[in-house]
Image (spheres, rainbow, N blue to C red):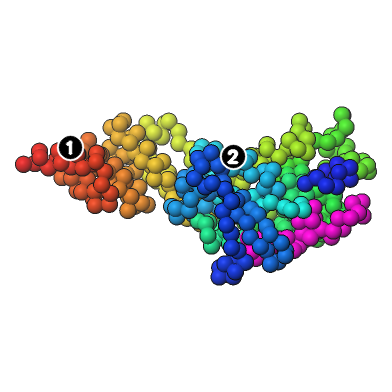
Amino acid sequence: MIKSNFKNSMTTFFYSLALLFFSFSAQAQENNPFTVGFEKSSPSKILGQQRKVWIHIPNSNGGNTNTGKGHYPVIYLLDGDANFNDIVSMTEFMSNAGLCPPMIVVGILHPARMTDLTFGTDKETPGIIGNGEKFMLYVEKELMPYIELNYPTASYKIFIGHSVGGLTVVNTLVHQPNLFNAYVSLDGALWWNDQQIVREAKMTLANTNYKGKTLFMALANRMEKGVDTVEVQKDTTESTELIRSNLQFIKAISKNKTNQLRFKHAFYENDDHSSVRLIGEYDALRFIFDYYKLKIYNSELEDPNFKLDSLLTTHYDNVSDQIGYLIKPGESQVNNLAYHMLNQKQFIKAEALFKLNITNYPETANCHDGLGDLYLAKGDKEKAIACFKKTLSLQIIPETKQKLETLLKEKK
């Protein structure tokens, strides 16, 4: 929230232990194909009140059902009621485009957001006593263990917040850097309590190793016409305190480049405090996962000697190193590429890709069926029969059954 706006309107917006803390009950129709998530509610012992979150499970995992098909990074999203739909749509689009892995989204709702998302008091906002430390204790000790116990989570976690949510994100990075892997502050209210977090960060950034941690900061334009991000730092008025506090924090980061924090910030000249959220969220996720997209050139597809299987293996080994857990090439991704090579009669490349799929997904019938089609195209009927038999031992596929019956008749 922007400081001046708040003053005008103060009313605006392990695992066994988790089972004791949480007795969640569903509040949405999870089978409705138009829902993007579902609500869970629980009493928090730490906060002494009922708390709600909205949860989205990736569509690739069955949407709102926990099918156990995979393990996914988790985005913990502050101000969930305002940001949830944007982030869900964004992550689904980006994962379908191969720009990031599918992700679980946990949108946290706030009965009193200023209490949750600020720390202590601010002399210019009387009547507000921030309870941010206790709120983050709830996130760490109650919410995160519950999510990790009940949903198919991977170890990688992202923390996203806007305005005072951005303040909470930055405060967590400074004081609890190991709680998340990536931090996203969208026009964070770093002005709070005379820029307390900026002052604290100057010491912490110099003495903390942030290796493996990522921070993205989005800054909106609330400056007068003709003023730029250099000139505004000379200003002392309240109206520019938000951007000035962010710029001072960025300057503190630039002075401590040896702490290994992976950092990027962006100033959006044509966006204000409200509109910066959407573009900032997208750019943040693109930056966080800038290593994720696989690039294959046409020349590599056309070259019969180019080893596509090696390219895939090397790429996903790098992705796994970056994200901190094993990610394999997608079964459908490799299958489609293998069939493309098969249709181009590049049998060596197709065979290597089908075999790569079998190595990664040995219990998936479709992988063996694809290799059978390859041998059928090459005229190696004995190997095709063996592959189709293996396929049917894993899953009865009518088309595969018909292919096998035809080959067996031809042998007689």
On the picture, is 287 further left or further right than 12?
left
Instruction: Give the labeled residue for mark 1.
Output: 379
Q: Local crowd at mark 2 within 10 Å, few (<14), some, or many (≥20)?
A: some
Q: Position of residue 408 (x, y in %)?
A: 12, 42
Amino acid identity at mark 1: Gly
Nearer to me, 228 or 254: 228
Please identify the residue farthest to the top as the structure is shown: 225
Q: Residue at x 73, y 37 (%)?
A: 276
* Residue stretch rendered in magenta on the structure: 114-143
Amino acid identity at mark 2: Met
Q: Residue at x 72, y 52 (%)?
A: 110
Q: Local crowd at mark 1 within 10 Å, few (<14), some, or many (≥20)?
A: few
Q: Residue at x 28, y 37 (%)?
A: 347
In which image quadrant can residue 348 be found? top left
On the picture, is 247 further left or further right than 287?
right
Q: Earlier in the sequence, mark 1 or mark 2?
A: 2
Nearer to me, 154 or 43: 43
Instruction: Give the labeled residue for mark 2.
Output: 90
